[in-house]
Amino acid sequence: MLEKWFQLKKNGTTVQNELIAGVTTFMAMAYILAVNPAILADAGIDKGAQMIATALAAFAGTLIMGLMANYPFALAPGLGINAFFAYTICGQMGYSWQVALLFVFVEGIIFIVLSLTSLREKIFDAIPLQMKNGISVGIGLLIAFIGLQNAHIIVASETTLVRLTSFRENFHTEGICALLALVGFLIIVFLQARRVKGAVLIGILATWALGMICQLAGIYTVDPENGFASLFPIWSNFDPAAIRLTFAQCFQADLSSVPVLDVIILLCTFLYMDTFDTLGALIGMGKRAHMLDEKGRLPRIRQALLSDALATSIGAVLGTSTTTTFAESSTGVEAGGRTGLSSVVTAFLFLGAIFLAPVFIAIPGFATAPALIYVGFMMFSTVVNIDFHKPLEAVPAYLCIIVMTLSYSISEGIAFGMISYVVLHVVSGRAKDVKPLLYIFAILFVLKYIFL
């Protein structure tokens, strides 16, 4: 049955590979179960309810992706978009979280309609192949950058924005986390070099285990106020019925006090962020898994985009921000995942996380960081496919990489890449080489930066 549904042999994989990949992807994404509720709590949403909503949205979206599109890609409420939800719509603009959820729901419905047409598919195909290579590299660097931050190897600086951590200062918190993450990274590299199956997952678990040993030995100090929680699960009363506090609240929103212009602006912003975050993730992971054809197209792209759109609306009904395809799925791809079976595994782990929340929330960022850093390295290898002897193609890819990494946003990187691609081709007298759809989006991106 599994072979018939997921076509394992055709995709060069096995049930064992898919199981390992599914678990690996989940481990790399489990942090969202703690991070997303923490961010949306600032919008006034109950943390317990939000954790359940996050897990259920990830379960539903990932399951749909696995069964409908047969891809090893996992979905969950996206970072960046959730911050826009909490701090811009509910914070700066002062709207209720119910209103914000309604915008997410409507955006999802619009995406469902667009996904049933060929528009989003055409956007994917319109992106030049060299820029797709750049997107893959950019996502790799962004994932690695996130991993370095989660490991406390790279920390904030008042003078240079970021800096390398001091291993001597705060050794029992930041220092030991950074050191353990580096050890975990070396473990993954060593195991990969020896072709050990599940190397990334083993690296995550080994790093976590070393951390627990350090906590027992007093080398790692628990400091919750500064983000250094206990590495052991803390069991407490957990109420799965808390989902009632957010379920279907998007339909209770009162839009009577929301100006029409704000409605248009917020919907367009959600559409922009979600579209290009999703397309970027699909391009990056598809490229890494060698799923793109010779023209850079992704088979079954419509099913993948429809899965993402359905997940967004379902997530809004459950009570969470935009659910989107996660670039961290690359960890599962690197572990050998090639079909939707690995996504199904990841999905049910998210469902189980509702009842084992303390275990998964206890997985520290420095334990998953080695996996992100290694996957970033593997995705960076795509840089050799960029033809730097053709600056009209290579410079937009380069800008895409740099902006994506430093702005912490896949969508902003794609925007800069598209704008520069169109401008360079027009001023070089090669306007006819640019697909019409790229002109439209380049103009829309410019207008966004002017007016939004």
Image (spheres, rainbow, N blue to C red):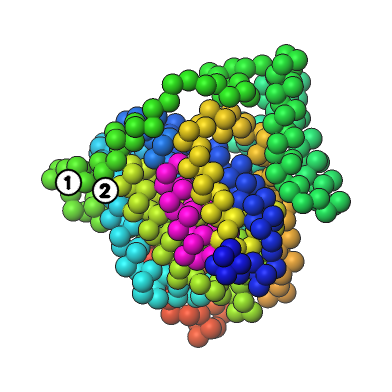
Q: Is residue 115 visible?
A: yes
Residue 148 locus on image (x, y percent): 67, 39
Q: Earlier in the sequence, mark 2 or mark 1?
A: 2
Q: Which segment is the magenta one?
A: 55-76
Q: Secondary structure at mark 2?
A: helix
- Does residue 242 sit above or below 275 in this rendering? above
Residue 418 locus on image (x, y percent): 51, 67
State which mark lies toward you, 2 or 1: 2
Q: Secondary structure at mark 1?
A: loop
Q: Nearer the viewer, residue 125 or 108?
A: 108
State whether the magenta stretch is mostly helix, strand or loop: helix
Q: Residue at x 70, y 23 (%)?
A: 212
Q: Amino acid at mark 1?
A: Leu
Residue 312 locus on image (x, y percent): 38, 53
Q: Residue at x 74, y 35 (%)?
A: 206
Q: Nearer the viewer, residue 403 or 47?
A: 47
Asked where in the image residue 417 lies, by quadrant, the reply is bottom right
Disc 2 marks which residue? 102
Disc 1 marks which residue? 255
Residue 46 located within the stretch drawn in magenta:
no
- Does residue 343 sit above or below 383 in this rendering? above
